[in-house]
Image (tube, helix red, strand yellow):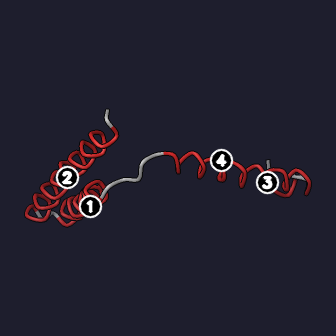
Amino acid sequence: MKLTNVKLPGLGAIIVLTFCSFGAYAAESQDAAPINKDQVEGRVDEAKGKVKEATGVILDDKKMQVEGNAQKNIGKVQKGYGDLKQDIKKGN
């Protein structure tokens, strides 16, 4: 269906429903415990490692590929440590 075929009241309803669903999601997400520093840093390092590893593959640079893989795995470990800390704090 093309956007031009949608009547204005229908489009308005879609926009309103979309914003309402964002509000409901935001209310649900506030109930969850915030993520801790180790989880954030772990995810960032994991993403950096993935990018570095992919760049090494594209450039055919084995050293960069290995460094990226190592950084990615270190990030996974740190993220897991942060997850464990959060589980212990929540009492699970």
Q: Tell which tag, 3 or 4, sits nearer the viewer.
A: 4
Residue 25 vertical position relative to residue 58 in the rendered view, above or below? above
Label 3 belongs to which residue?
16
Residue 6, position as x, y percentages in the image: 87, 52
- Mark 2–mark 3 Cα distance, whole angstroms, equals 40 Å
Which residue is pictured at 57% across the width and 45% down the height? 28
The disc at residue 41 is 1
Name which residue type carries label 1. Glu
Give, as a three-letter code, the residue at label 2.
Gln
Mark 2 vs 4, N-terminal side: 4
Secondary structure beneath disc 4?
helix
In the rendered structure, which disc, 1 or 4, sits on the residue that comes first in sequence?
Answer: 4
The residue that label 4 is drawn on is 24
Quarter location, residue 43 = bottom left
Q: Residue furthest top?
A: 92
Placement of the C terminus among the 4 image quadrants: top left
